[in-house]
Image: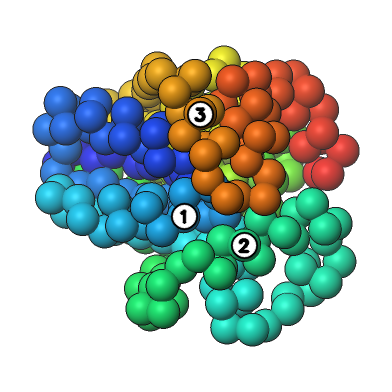
Amino acid sequence: MRIAALYDIHGNLPALEAVLREVDQAAVDLILVGGDVFPGPMPSETLERLLSLQTPSRFILGNGDREVMAQMAGVETDWFRSAQEQWRDPVRWTAQQLASEHPHTLNAWPATFKLQVNGIGRVLFCHGTPRNDTEVVTRLTPVERLLPIFEGLDTPLVVCGHTHMQFDRIVGTTRVVNAGSVGMPYGEPGAYWLLLGPEVALRFTQYDLANAADRIRDTEYPQADDFARRHVLEPPSQDKMLEAFGRME
């Protein structure tokens, strides 16, 4: 079995379209969407594209999806009440765009998913870490902090996302791989994803960034121009974001 793991799409439909073209060429048996389909500039179109996949697919929930779902239900979470308006506005807007039937779809997404992969063994997919969807893990996170999180899982490989930067590292007896971000990467502009079976292959897809930026600017997303510039054309460097995540940790 070959699996394409697509994480942190964030409503960037042009990036998703480019990755799916490569996924088709890879002849995968399953597409695993690893959370944070939302928020983002093309939420309805992105979700509809994912739900119309011909390849079998499974979804897990990310913290962004969870916050959008709460807004759709009219609930203000602790995060939403304390977040700056620049973070709340995209969540609120995204929730307003999704059709009435979508809450039922999102409610069916679990927090984690396990699957046996040929050549690798049992794989645990999560968004942040196996214990929650907001915990920060990067390639620089001290191993002593990670051991209580990843030891004792009875699985040789954990695939995560959330921090939008790929890595492949060993924590105790567990291999931990970050699939990177399809739609909001840090580092070189493009789309990042993961191909599993029988190897573990970190993948990078180039696409027409200028065209994608124009399509995003044509939406009514409240931060469309900023998204096009900061997440498509000129993403923050990994060094800058590693420093920021280090302060959070």
Write down the residue under mark 3.
Answer: 214
- Front residue of this view, candidates 246 and 19: 19
Mark yes or no: residue 81 visible. Answer: yes
Q: Residue at x 47, y 34 (%)?
A: 215
First-in-chain label (2 vs 3): 2
Tell me, for residue 93, which label it has, or none.
2
Closer to the chain start, of discs 1 and 3, is 1
Q: Quadrant of residue 139?
A: top right
Of the two numbered discs 1 and 2 on the same chain, state the one appearing first in sequence. Answer: 1
Crowding near the residue tagged with mark 3, few <14, some 14–19, many ≥20 C-alpha atoms within 10 Å:
few
For mark 3, give the secondary structure: helix
In this image, 62 relative to 123: left or right?
right
Q: Residue at x 61, y 76 (%)?
A: 70
Q: Is residue 93 above or below residue 29?
A: below
**Farthest residue, direction bottom:** 74
Residue 43 — which label?
1
Identify which amino acid the numbered label 3 is placed on.
Asp
Q: Is residue 164 left or right of residue 35?
A: right
CA distance for labels 2 and 3: 20 Å
Q: Quadrant of the N terminus?
A: top left
- Tell me: residue 228, above or below residue 104: above
Q: Nearer the viewer, mark 2 or mark 3?
A: 3
Horizontal side, residue 34 vs residue 51: left or right: right
Q: In the rendered structure, which amino acid carries the disc numbered 1?
A: Pro
Q: Position of residue 211 (x, y in %)?
A: 44, 23
Which residue is at a point 60% across and 31% down the rendered structure image? Answer: 228
